[in-house]
Amino acid sequence: MRKLGVGVLGVGEMGRRHAENLRRLVPDAQLMAVADVSAERAHQAATELEIEHSYSSLEAMLECKGLDAVVVATPDKFHAAGIKLAAAAGKDILCEKPLALTLPDAHELLGVVSKAGVRLQVGFMRHYDPAYAAAMKRIEAGEIGVPVVFKSIGRDKDGPPLSAYQSNVNGMLFYGNTIHDFDLARWLMQDEVVEVHAYTTVAIRPEVAQFGDVVASVVNLKFAHGAIGNIESGAQAAYGYDVRTEVVGSKGSILVGSLNRIPATFLSASGGTQILADHFLSTFADAYVAEMRDFVETMLQDRPPRINGEDGLKALAIAVAAENSHLQGQAVKVSIGNSATAK
Amino acid sequence: MRKLGVGVLGVGEMGRRHAENLRRLVPDAQLMAVADVSAERAHQAATELEIEHSYSSLEAMLECKGLDAVVVATPDKFHAAGIKLAAAAGKDILCEKPLALTLPDAHELLGVVSKAGVRLQVGFMRHYDPAYAAAMKRIEAGEIGVPVVFKSIGRDKDGPPLSAYQSNVNGMLFYGNTIHDFDLARWLMQDEVVEVHAYTTVAIRPEVAQFGDVVASVVNLKFAHGAIGNIESGAQAAYGYDVRTEVVGSKGSILVGSLNRIPATFLSASGGTQILADHFLSTFADAYVAEMRDFVETMLQDRPPRINGEDGLKALAIAVAAENSHLQGQAVKVSIGNSATAK
Amino acid sequence: MRKLGVGVLGVGEMGRRHAENLRRLVPDAQLMAVADVSAERAHQAATELEIEHSYSSLEAMLECKGLDAVVVATPDKFHAAGIKLAAAAGKDILCEKPLALTLPDAHELLGVVSKAGVRLQVGFMRHYDPAYAAAMKRIEAGEIGVPVVFKSIGRDKDGPPLSAYQSNVNGMLFYGNTIHDFDLARWLMQDEVVEVHAYTTVAIRPEVAQFGDVVASVVNLKFAHGAIGNIESGAQAAYGYDVRTEVVGSKGSILVGSLNRIPATFLSASGGTQILADHFLSTFADAYVAEMRDFVETMLQDRPPRINGEDGLKALAIAVAAENSHLQGQAVKVSIGNSATAK
Amino acid sequence: MRKLGVGVLGVGEMGRRHAENLRRLVPDAQLMAVADVSAERAHQAATELEIEHSYSSLEAMLECKGLDAVVVATPDKFHAAGIKLAAAAGKDILCEKPLALTLPDAHELLGVVSKAGVRLQVGFMRHYDPAYAAAMKRIEAGEIGVPVVFKSIGRDKDGPPLSAYQSNVNGMLFYGNTIHDFDLARWLMQDEVVEVHAYTTVAIRPEVAQFGDVVASVVNLKFAHGAIGNIESGAQAAYGYDVRTEVVGSKGSILVGSLNRIPATFLSASGGTQILADHFLSTFADAYVAEMRDFVETMLQDRPPRINGEDGLKALAIAVAAENSHLQGQAVKVSIGNSATAK
């Protein structure tokens, strides 16, 4: 059987994991090459993963023979450019979230993808997490009746170093963190978010404000068909990596997520203690594998991706509205912008 | 030692519990009388609790010899009138939440209380719940650093019958349910809520809209010193009575609340199952006892109440702002109103 | 309606709680008197509970007019004598566990009770705990199929002071702690324990061995109809009071018990922490109330007690067999002894 | 860097997993070949894992060039023979538990291994499970003081088909299931089990008795230095795969294990429900990977294995004693037998 030849662009923490999964855990894929703006990092990844090719640019990698698809895992600012280049070269694409950092960029890249006739999947890997997937299955089966309230929490453990804010290559909290929950909101509620209201805070780290970013946020959601919701995000919860989601329905509710990293409790006179989850790569390890397997299978079988460019665009549009609400101090309608112009 | 002579006004579900607690579990109190608009209900309660006096009005009960204090547990609409009457008669008061249904009413009653020189405690009993109390103790000890995000959920199991909406003696969701969380927000964050934004829904029971009420809500909170928060309330979660609160701080966080009614799990091929909490009177049974004991002790020792009229007013002001946000579709500043005018 | 006049013998920790419950939470009972070998302690309890009579002996209390029933809550060694005296005086009895410390004592007291025609309930209050009661209800409903394995853990937090061992008024671990689980084994499995095997340890407190006691034990159980089980008991678990039971059935299983005292979790970089249960009086507070209410109602309605003298005898017989196994180093058959001889 | 060439003997459920892990998740290993008594099954595994060689016997596989080590994952009865053959051929070995089904077999194979100068690791993979490993780390750090009680539960979900009993290629419950806990007892308690007492039952499936097997068991343990313990095992718990262990120490305790397969709770009017763990391959997926990585690294670095033949022998000796206790109806001392004779 034919294998999908895949190259990974960007081998930082996330791209490196994708490359490893492709190399080791997706039998139907062949990891052809990795590329990174740091040739040395690309070379090292290739060596460790025992593959032949490493490149210092996407352009160079696109010349690699046998390359069918590209995984875009660069800093967020470069997603749009990476997608456009790969699409123009006729490659199918799995792009990390967010699809882009601005709606015009998103529209433009979707235009290129469409024109090139390639397929694009967006990296909302929580769809592939066993607990989220089980939740969705039950929602679709009608077990909770009509979903009416969506709640989600996403707290990172340690705030990024200030240098990460200064480098200006990623979007603010809404684009890198809350975007997952914006996507979950659409997916689990099977509905569209039409308006949002955001409060944000920099109270415990005021210096991030100068970079347009925030430490934590709460975003109220209004859905098209009457449901409501709220998403809380935090950049530095101190205690751990904490992702939890609830969907309240007319007949029942579902809670997804757990605080604990391992099933062990330590008991002493000072109480019972658990070790807490601390990183998305361990919490969602299985989800990343399942995501990549599904992407590869989807490409090989010439099916439309489960999470496509439009999903990436719509989640982005909610993030944009949330940022505008944060800036304007009032509720803001969600709009994907003038797609005509964008094309 | 002197006992506090207490009368209970209103012996519906809540007042009846207060009367029982006073009769049985607060040794320093003497339940002198109960009163209810239904003389029969009052009489029955008196009989079952083995006390001498029952009345069909507060006015009548106030004549009861030995009465030092009154517990106001009528439908919400009558709280203000009850407080004013009791205060004017020189009785100390424990009033169920909410203090009143409008800010002018609240200001007026506070004026009467102040002029009468009596003491007024508001029934935010969660302060006395062992888990909430332990949380507060740790927050005050600085264990979580600076509190920066407040989250709370309050879901009732079964929605009230439509007749309860029609009778128009209680306020909407914000006044009867969310008011607890508005109070917790002030208490646990040791800060004031200055602005709110609310989305509400009637999606799964549209007929409550005609009564100005809603089925569920999410309320974003902005605090005076930079913190933020969100409260979700629901009138009919179907699965149980679910109250949970989180406070995220710069160094740690605290989660309060549990879904389960009893510590038992039933395991079968179809999964592990727990019996869920279903009513505030069981979830907060201990809190109601501790609240009443503290009220009685506070009165006997001539101390100011831990949760006073101003607390009741400020929580009410947040509820009013939330209702206004719901009506106006935008964020609304919290204001306790012109107390001068109100009088 | 007539009230049951009750006197409490022994107002240490346990008896004091029974007296409080009778005084405050069992409307159908009237706490007539308390008695204690310490007249001062009896007097103080009477004062605090606002009752008229206190005595320094059971004999004296039995003279108290209006006394229908006696709660025996002395040190274990004196249970048998207390029961016999009360029975001979024609009083119904609720006796704390264990019924007695030896089988001959048990047989003798049962003879007296029988001859006197009074009723005797034994204080296995876990039957009244909401979680255990829910478990039993499901077992009786056949939800777990045929029960086949019984497991139970009972760990006390802090070991008794050595003086408690020296005073020699209570039995060893099996009689004061494991006895609850021996009773649960019979009750939940609806079967009899016919043989036991015990290992014990004094490893972390060798000085208790001189008093014939142990620090921890594991007791294997063989039931009459083929089921098996194991009970672990500990006198000093250090971290808390930990009581948990499991019944494994052919179709499902039930787990009862929880480690946590309050529903709160404290999260910090060093983990998630809960406050642990630490005392039977808080863990089983509701059970003690329900037990007393049922006892009082049972007496007033002239029904046979739910947990009778035979239950006390049979649980004791298992404890005796376990102690013999501990002493002899081999499995020992359970025998209630020759009741004829015992008399 | 040199890779360890590994062949897997037996590609049933377990061997297949080992082969997959070697092929995909252990970069320092090269899966050279698989062998199975069914040539077809071996061939299919090789095809799916994209490796060149498959064989229908260990003898044949041992001829494969580049083979450094063998993983023995046959039915239990054939472990001893597989080990001896592989050892005689100079290969290092990872053998699934149990090491053998009889003590003479174990001694004999250990003699062959020793004489051949190869290294042998036994597949007690729980040492590599993150929760068990964290527990051991804390025990070794002295956090729970002196370990004094060991408790463990191992319940399989569905009993094997009767044909599995009839085929007579695996040992009874103690050898295939409880053996893990016998090993954990030695490892976590850092002590030796010197005596055991077992009760067993066939109550809910009497037909397994004819094959010398049981449905469930409880085994009391006595350790050399005064600690005690109990292990419960079950072949058909119906509700799921349930492995839990507790170590009680003088200063604290540790609980390992969780019932839930995914972190999700489904709430409805009939309760809160979780999906339960149902298979060892999912519960211990990470442990199997970590075990294989450690084995491969250990071999490449010429270190002694963490879990060696003696560990396998000693766990087996406890199982033998437990079976004897089951047969004889009394406590039995643990003995590894006359090793001189065995050689």
Image (tube, coloured by chain):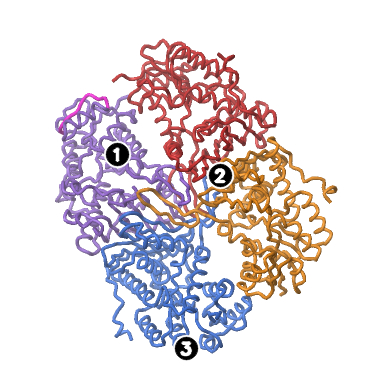
Chain colours: A red, B orange, C blue, D purple
Q: Which mark is residue A247?
A: none
Horizontal side of residue A82 vs D131, given as left or right: right
* Residue in front for this viewpoint, D64 or C90: C90
- Subunit under mark 3: C
User: Is disc 3 on the same chain as disc 2?
Assistant: yes
Rendered location of residue C172, percent (x, y): 40, 72
Q: CA distance from mark 2 to mark 3?
A: 61 Å
Categorize mark 1 by other alpha carbons within 10 Å: few (<14), some (14-19), many (20+).
some
Rendered location of residue A293, percent (x, y): 38, 27
Q: CA distance from mark 1 to mark 2?
A: 39 Å
- Mark 3 element type: loop
| Residue B299 seen anywhere in this rendered image of the structure | yes
The residue indicated by pointer 2 is: C268
Which residues are the magenta region?
D49-58
* Amino acid marked by disc 1: Pro
What residue is shown at x 62% (from left), y 83% (from top)? C52
What residue is shown at x 61% (from left), y 35% (from top)? A219
Categorize mark 3 by other alpha carbons within 10 Å: few (<14), some (14-19), many (20+).
some
The residue indicated by pointer 3 is: C89
Single out the mark in the foreground, 1 or 2.
2
Q: CA distance from mark 1 to mark 3?
A: 76 Å
- Mark 1 element type: loop
C15 lies above or below B191: below
The residue indicated by pointer 1 is: D304
C27 lies above or below A190: below
